[in-house]
Image: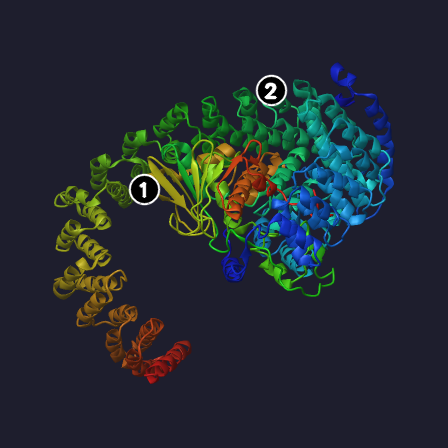
C-alpha cells in the first residue's frame, strides 16, 4: 500500500519540529553521570544519566544504580543501565534486590535477571513462582525459562502444579524457553520430557502446538510417527501444527509421509498438504499431486495444479496439457498458468505443439503461452500462424510477433502488412512492425525500407504503412506522409492528413496549412484545417509557435465548429496576444460561451504564473466582457474572481 | 493413544522421576485452571475450535481478526484487509478511546452492524478472545515487537506494521516466539508484494544484471539519524478510559504525558522511533536484501558518514556485496526506492513508477514473465495482506516472515548505532554481535519497563 499523502505531509511537517533537538547518545563521562545520580537532580536528568550509563557505565556505577531499584520512578531506568553493564556485581545487586522489592520494581528486576541469564538466582526465582502477585510469578517463570538450565526446567515443572491457573501461559512460556535451551545444550531427553508433558487436550492450543513441535523435532527421525499421527488428528489445530512443523523438517521420508497422507484426509487438509508439498518441491511427491490434480474436489484440484510450478518438472507437462482441456474453465486456466511458469524444454515443446494445432482454441492458447513464456524461438511459428485461416489466430499471432520478434524480422512482418486479409490483420501487422522498429537503436533507419513499399502498395496496405511511419516520426517519414496527401485514394489522403495532425513536432504544420489552403478536395481542406488546429494544441510545441499557427488558421476558419476548435486552442496559450484573438468572438452568439471560457482559461494561467501589473491590466477588459458574455453562471463567477485579482494586481502598479 | 505415550525406548527411559511427579501435579494444575475464572483467566477447557479457531483456520473457513493500536496507518491496513472475502474483524484494542472508536466506526459501517467490540487493555484483550485467529498490530514502533510477541504467545497469527522491532533483541524475541508457537507473522513491508519491486528483486537475482555488486536503499527524507532525548512539557494525564498513558508508553522509559506524542509526535524520539533510517529502511533494506538474496543475514561492516542522516553510508555483506543508504532521489524518483547495480546493467524502482527504470529497455520485455513466474513458483500473490491470509491457512512462511523482519531490522539498528557512536562498526551476523565494540553491543537491547516485558 502506498503511504498516503496526508501522512507524508504530516510527517514532513513533524520533521520541522523533530529536527529541532536531536542530541548525542552520550553527553557526559561515567563519573559525571554517577554524580548526577547522587545529586538532587530531577527525574529527567537522572533518567538521562541512567540511559547514558547503559552505554558507558561500568562497575563503579552499580552501587548507585542498585540503590535506585526500589525507587518507583527510577527503578526502570536503573535497570536500563544495569542490564547492559558487563560486570558480575550487577547480577549480585539484582539478586539482592529480589528479596527487597515488590510490585513493578520486582517484576522488572526479575526480567533483568532473565536478560542476563543469571543462573545463580535460580533458588530466589523459584521462590517467586508462588508469589501472590501474578505478575511476579509470571515474570519468574519466564526468567527461569531464559536461564534454561536443567535445574530451572525441573523447578518450573514442579512449581507449575502449585501455581495459579492464570499463570499457566507464563509457565508454559518459561518451559518453552527451557526446551530451546536444553536442546541447544544437547539435553534432548529432558527437553522432550517437557514437550510430552504438555500433550494434553485441555491445554490452550498454542501450548499444545509448541509442545507438539518440540516433540516432533526433538525426536528427529523418530518423530515421524508422531508427525503422521498429528496429521491425522481430528483436531484441526494439531494438523495445522504438524504441517507447520513439517516445514522445518527436510528429507525424502518426510515428503513421502506428507504425500501418503493426501489420500486419507479431507479437502481442507489436502489443500494445506499440497501447499506444503509445493514448498518442499520434492519430485517424489509428484505422482500423488498428479492424482489430486486429475480427480476430486475442485478446490483440491486447483491447489494441486497450482502446486506444480514450484517443482519445475517435465513430468508435469503432459498432466497440465491434458488439464488445459478440462471442461471446467477455472481448472483449465489454472493448468495453463502453471504450464506457463515451467522453465523446461518439455514445456516449450508442448506449447509449440499447441501453436501448430489444427484446433483454433489450442492455437490461441499456444500463442498466449508463447507470449507469456517469452519463447522467442517461436517467432517463425508465429509468422506462419499470422497467415492462418482463422480470423482470431492471425492478429493474436501478429501481436505476439511484435512482442517477441527482433528487428531482423521486420521484412517478414512488412510483407504481412501488405498481404493482410482484413483491416484487423493489417493493423496488427503494422503495430508489430512499429514495435520492431522501436526495438532498434535508430528507428528512423527503418523508414526507407517502409517508405519504399508505398508506391506499390494497395490503398489499405498503404494506410498501414503510413501508420508505421507515423509512429516512427522524423523528417524522412514526414516527407513520405506529406507525399501521401496527394494520393489518388481519398482514404489514403485522410490517413496522411490525420498523421500530420498528430505529428510529434511542428514540422508538419506547413504541410497541413498548405493543404488547408490549397487542397483540391473541400473535405481534405477541412480535415487539414482541423488537423492543423489539433497540432497547434500540442503543448510540447512552443507557445509563440502555436500562436502563430492560430493566426494562420484564423484566416481559414469559417464554420462554427472550427471557430470553437480555434478558441479551445487559444485558451490553452497563456499570452495576452491569444486574448486579443479570442475577444472578438465574445460578441458572436454562436461562440461567446467558448470565447468566455477561453478568456477565463488564459487569464487564469497568466495570473497563476505571476502576471505583472501591466499584463494584469490587459486582462481586465477581456474578463469584464467574458463575465458579461458567459451564459454559464459558474463561468461568469470564475471570470469575476479573476477580474478581481487582475484589478488588484493592476492597481498595485 | 498418543505416540508420545509410547515413545521410543531410549526416550521413554529418559523420563525421570522428576517428570513423573510433575505429571501428577499437572493434572491437579489443569483441574484448578479449569475452574478458575476472571478476566485474565485463559479458557483452558473449551477447545479453540468451539469458540473460534484461534490461529488454526482451514482453507474453507473465515479468518477472525482483531486489531491492536490501529491509527492512521493502521486504518489503511484495515481498509486493505476488510474487503478480503474470508476475513472478518471482530474487535480492536487501543489505549486511546478516540482511536478505537474510530476503528469501530469503520468496521461497523463495513458490516452494517454494531457487533465490533473494543478493548483498552491488551493483556485482557488477548486473554479473553480465543476466538480471534490473528491480529493486525499497527501501534507505534515502540510496541510492535512486544505486541507481536504477546499476541503470538496467546496463539494469534500477527500482521505487524513496520518498523517491527526497536532493538536487535526485540527482533530475536519475535523470531523465537513465532518459531516456538508455530505462528504465522508478516511485517508490513508491502513492497515485497508489489509487482514493480518484485520484478526488480527477481531481475537482480536472475543474473541478468551480471553479479550484482551494489544495492541502494532509500532512507526517509525527514528526521535525522540522531534522536531526541528531551521530554515535551508535561500535561495533566487524561482519564485512563480516554488515554491510558502507562499502556501507551508500554516498555519505554516513563515520561510525562503530552498529547502531542499520541497524535504521532513520537517520531524522532529515541525511546519511540527508529530514526530516518528505520522509517524507510524497514522497507528498503528488506527490498535490497531480497534482491541480493541475503534476507537471512545482515551486513558485516558499516561505514560511518559524517552527516546528520546516514545518507551515503556504505554497508558491506560478508560476500563483498555492498548496500548503500541513500536519502535523496539520486537513484530513483519517489518514496522507498531501491536500485541494483551489476556489471551488465541496473534496475531502479520507487513508489509511483508505472514500470521500473532499467539500464536497457529490453530488460523490461520479460516483466510479465518474471512476475508471473514468481507468483506461480512461490504461490505469493501481489498483495501483502493476501499473502498473510493465505499463509494463515497454509501455515507457510510469509514473504516478510520473522527472520526477514529481524535481519533487515538488525541492519537498521546497526546503521543507527553506527551513526550514534559516530564510528565504523563490524558486525557478526552469526553471533549477532558487534566485533570488538562493547558500547555498540550494549545498544543491542534496552531494558523494558515492567510489566511490559517479554
Q: Position of residue A292 (x, y in %)?
A: 57, 26
- Asked if one can make out residue A7 in the rendered structure from this viewpoint, the answer is yes
- Give the mark count: 2
Left or right, B208 with reference to B173 = left
Residue A449, image x, y percentages:
16, 41
C-alpha span from label 1 to label 2: 46 Å
Corner quadrant of residue A648: bottom left
Q: Quadrant of the C terminus of chain A?
A: bottom left
Query: Mark 1 touching mark 2, by CB under 8 A?
Result: no
Q: Is residue B50 visible?
A: no
Residue B393 horizontal side relative to residue A97, left or right: left
Badge 2 crowding class, 10 Å Cα cut-off, few under 14, some 14 to 19, many 20 or more, is: some
Q: State which quadrant residue B43 falls in.
A: top right
Q: Give the farthest residue toward the bottom.
A: A651
Question: Residue A469: where, in percent of width, then height?
Answer: 20, 48
Query: Do marks 1 and 2 share a subunit?
Result: no
Q: Secondary structure at mark 1?
A: helix
Image quadrant of residue A575?
Answer: bottom left
Residue bearing mark 1: B361
**Residue A188 vertical placement versus A67 (above, below):** above
Point out which mark residue A627 bears: none
Q: Residue A256 got which mark?
A: 2
A515 relative position to B390: left or right: left
| Residue at the limit of the structure toward the top, as seen here | B9
Label 2 residue SS:
helix
**Near-viewer residue (B344 or B109):** B344
Which residue corresponds to the image point at 78% horizontal and 16% vertical from the top-left? B13
Left or right of A131? Residue B123 is left
Q: Position of residue A616 (x, y in %)?
A: 31, 79
Closer to us: mark 1 or mark 2? 1
Amino acid at each position: 500500500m502506498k503511504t498516503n499523502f496526508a501522512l507524508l505531509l504530516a510527517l514532513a511537517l513533524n520533521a520541522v519540529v523533530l529536527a529541532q533537538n536531536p542530541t548525542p547518545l552520550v553527553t557526559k563521562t561515567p563519573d559525571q553521570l554517577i554524580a548526577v545520580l547522587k545529586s538532587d537532580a530531577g527525574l529527567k536528568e537522572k533518567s538521562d544519566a541512567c540511559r547514558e550509563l547503559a552505554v558507558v557505565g561500568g562497575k563503579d556505577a552499580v552501587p548507585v544504580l542498585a540503590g535506585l531499584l526500589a525507587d518507583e520512578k527510577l527503578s526502570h531506568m536503573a535497570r536500563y543501565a544495569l542490564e547492559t553493564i558487563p560486570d558480575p556485581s550487577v547480577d549480585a545487586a539484582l539478586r539482592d534486590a529480589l528479596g527487597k522489592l515488590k510490585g513493578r520494581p520486582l517484576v522488572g528486576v526479575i526480567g533483568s535477571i532473565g536478560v542476563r541469564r543469571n543462573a545463580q538466582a535460580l533458588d530466589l526465582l523459584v521462590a517467586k513462582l508462588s508469589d501472590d502477585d501474578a505478575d511476579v510469578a509470571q515474570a519468574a517463570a519466564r526468567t527461569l525459562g531464559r536461564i534454561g538450565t536443567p535445574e530451572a526446567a525441573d523447578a518450573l515443572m514442579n512449581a507449575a502444579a502449585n501455581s495459579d491457573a492464570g499463570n499457566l501461559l507464563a509457565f508454559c512460556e518459561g518451559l518453552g524457553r527451557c526446551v530451546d535451551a536444553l536442546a541447544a545444550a544437547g539435553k534432548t531427553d529432558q527437553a522432550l520430557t517437557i514437550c510430552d508433558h504438555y500433550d494434553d487436550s485441555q491445554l490452550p492450543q498454542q501450548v499444545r502446538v509448541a509442545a507438539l513441535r518440540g516433540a516432533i523435532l526433538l525426536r528427529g527421525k523418530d518423530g515421524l510417527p508422531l508427525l503422521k499421527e498429528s496429521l491425522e488428528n481430528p483436531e484441526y489445530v494439531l494438523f495445522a501444527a504438524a504441517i507447520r512443523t513439517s516445514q522445518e523438517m527436510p528429507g525424502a521420508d518426510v515428503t513421502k509421509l506428507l504425500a501418503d497422507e493426501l489420500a486419507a484426509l479431507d479437502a481442507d487438509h489436502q489443500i494445506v498438504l499440497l501447499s506444503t508439498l509445493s514448498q518442499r518441491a520434492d519430485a517424489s511427491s509428484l505422482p500423488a499431486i498428479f492424482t489430486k490434480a486429475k480427480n476430486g474436489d475442485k478446490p483440491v484440484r486447483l491447489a494441486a495444479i497450482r502446486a506444480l510450478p514450484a517443482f519445475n518438472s517435465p513430468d508435469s507437462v503432459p498432466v497440465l496439457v491434458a488439464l488445459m482441456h478440462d471442461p471446467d474453465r477455472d481448472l483449465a486456466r489454472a493448468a495453463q498458468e502453471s504450464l506457463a511458469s515451467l522453465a523446461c524444454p518439455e514445456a516449450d515443446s508442448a506449447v509449440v505443439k499447441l501453436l501448430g494445432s489444427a484446433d483454433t482454441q489450442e492455437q490461441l492458447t499456444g500463442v498466449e503461452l508463447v507470449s507469456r513464456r517469452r519463447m522467442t524461438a517461436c517467432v517463425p511459428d508465429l509468422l506462419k500462424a499470422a497467415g492462418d485461416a482463422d480470423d482470431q489466430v492471425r492478429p493474436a499471432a501478429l501481436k505476439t510477433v511484435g512482442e517477441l520478434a527482433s528487428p531482423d524480422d521486420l521484412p517478414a512482418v512488412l510483407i504481412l502488412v501488405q498481404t493482410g486479409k482484413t483491416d484487423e490483420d493489417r493493423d496488427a501487422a503494422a503495430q508489430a512492425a512499429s514495435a520492431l522498429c522501436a526495438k532498434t537503436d535508430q528507428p528512423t533507419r527503418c523508414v526507407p525500407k517502409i517508405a519504399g513499399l508505398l508506391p506499390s502498395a494497395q490503398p489499405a496496405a498503404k494506410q498501414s504503412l503510413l501508420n508505421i511511419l507515423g509512429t516512427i516520426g522524423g523528417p524522412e517519414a514526414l516527407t513520405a506522409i506529406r507525399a501521401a496527401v496527394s494520393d489518388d485514394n481519398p482514404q489514403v489522403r485522410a490517413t496522411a492528413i490525420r498523421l500530420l495532425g498528430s505529428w510529434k513536432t511542428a514540422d508538419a504544420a506547413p504541410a497541413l496549412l498548405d493543404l488547408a489552403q490549397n487542397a483540391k478536395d473541400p473535405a481534405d481542406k477541412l480535415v487539414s484545417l482541423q488537423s492543423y488546429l489539433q497540432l497547434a494544441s500540442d503543448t510540447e510545441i512552443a507557445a509563440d509557435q502555436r500562436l502563430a499557427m492560430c493566426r494562420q488558421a484564423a484566416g481559414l476558419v469559417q464554420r462554427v465548429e472550427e471557430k470553437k476548435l480555434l478558441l479551445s486552442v487559444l485558451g490553452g496559450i497563456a499570452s495576452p496576444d491569444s486574448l486579443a484573438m479570442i475577444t472578438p468572438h465574445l460578441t458572436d452568439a454562436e461562440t461567446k460561451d467558448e470565447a468566455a471560457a477561453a478568456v477565463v482559461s488564459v487569464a487564469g494561467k497568466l495570473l497563476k504564473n505571476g502576471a505583472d501589473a501591466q499584463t494584469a491590466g490587459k486582462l481586465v477588459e477581456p474578463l469584464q466582457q467574458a463575465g458579461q458574455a458567459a451564459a454559464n453562471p459558474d463561468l461568469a463567477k470564475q471570470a469575476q474572481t479573476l477580474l478581481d485579482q487582475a484589478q488588484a494586481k493592476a492597481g498595485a502598479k | 493413544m498418543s505416540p508420545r505415550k509410547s515413545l521410543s525406548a531410549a526416550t521413554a527411559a529418559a523420563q525421570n522421576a522428576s517428570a513423573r511427579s510433575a505429571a501428577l501435579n499437572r493434572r491437579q494444575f489443569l483441574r484448578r485452571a479449569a475452574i478458575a475464572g476472571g478476566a485474565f483467566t485463559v479458557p483452558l477447557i473449551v477447545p479453540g475450535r468451539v469458540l473460534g479457531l484461534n490461529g488454526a483456520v482451514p482453507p474453507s473457513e473465515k479468518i477472525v481478526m482483531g486489531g491492536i493500536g490501529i491509527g492512521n496507518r493502521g486504518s489503511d491496513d484495515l481498509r486493505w484487509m476488510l474487503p478480503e472475502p474470508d476475513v472478518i474483524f471482530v474487535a480492536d484494542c487501543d489505549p486511546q478511546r478516540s482511536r478505537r472508536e474510530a476503528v469501530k466506526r469503520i468496521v461497523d459501517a463495513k458490516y452494517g452492524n454494531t457487533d465490533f467490540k473494543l478493548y483498552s487493555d491488551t493483556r485482557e484483550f488477548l486473554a479473553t478472545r480465543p476466538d480471534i485467529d490473528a491480529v493486525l498490530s499497527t501501534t507505534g514502533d515502540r510496541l510492535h515487537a512486544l505486541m507481536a510477541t504477546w499476541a503470538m504467545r496467546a496463539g494469534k497469527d500477527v500482521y505487524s506494521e513496520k518498523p517491527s522491532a526497536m532493538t536487535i533483541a526485540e527482533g530475536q524475541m519475535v523470531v523465537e516466539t513465532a518459531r516456538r508457537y508455530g505462528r504465522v507473522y508478516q511485517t508490513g513491508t508491502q513492497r515485497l508484494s508489489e509487482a514493480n519491486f518484485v520484478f526488480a528483486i527477481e531481475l537482480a537475482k536472475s543474473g541478468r544484471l551480471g553479479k550484482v555488486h551494489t544495492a541502494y536503499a532509500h532512507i526517509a527524507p525527514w528526521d535525522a539519524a540522531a534522536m531526541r532525548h528531551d521530554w515535551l512539557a508535561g500535561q495533566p494525564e487524561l482519564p485512563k478510559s480516554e488515554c491510558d498513558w502507562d499502556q501507551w508508553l508500554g516498555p519505554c522509559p516513563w515520561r510525562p504525558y503530552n498529547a502531542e506524542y499520541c497524535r504521532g509526535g513520537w517520531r524522532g524520539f529515541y525511546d519511540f522511533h527508529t530514526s530516518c533510517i528505520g522509517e524507510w529502511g524497514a522497507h528498503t533494506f528488506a527490498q535490497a536484501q531480497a534482491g541480493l538474496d541475503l534476507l537471512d543475514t545482515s551486513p558485516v561492516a558499516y561505514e560511518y558518514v559524517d552527516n546528520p542522516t546516514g545518507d551515503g553510508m556504505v554497508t558491506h555483506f560478508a560476500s563483498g556485496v555492498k548496500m548503500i543508504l541513500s536519502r535523496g532521489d539520486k537513484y530513483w524518483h519517489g518514496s522507498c526506492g531501491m536500485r541494483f547495480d551489476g556489471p551488465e546493467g541496473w534496475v531502479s524502482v520507487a513508489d509511483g513508477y508505472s514500470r521500473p527504470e532499467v539500464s536497457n529497455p529490453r530488460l523490461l520485455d520479460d516483466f510479465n514473465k518474471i512476475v508471473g513466474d514468481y507468483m506461480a513458483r512461490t504461490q505469493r500473490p501481489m498483495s501483502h495482506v493476501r499473502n498473510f491470509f493465505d499463509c494463515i491457512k497454509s501455515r507457510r512462511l510469509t514473504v516478510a516472515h520473522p527472520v526477514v523482519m529481524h535481519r533487515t531490522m538488525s541492519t537498521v539498528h546497526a546503521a543507527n548505532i553506527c551513526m550514534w557512536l559516530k564510528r565504523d562498526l563490524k558486525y557478526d551476523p552469526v553471533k549477532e554481535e558487534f566485533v570488538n565494540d562493547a558500547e555498540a553491543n550494549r545498544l543491542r537491547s534496552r531494558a523494558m519497563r515492567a510489566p511490559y516485558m517479554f
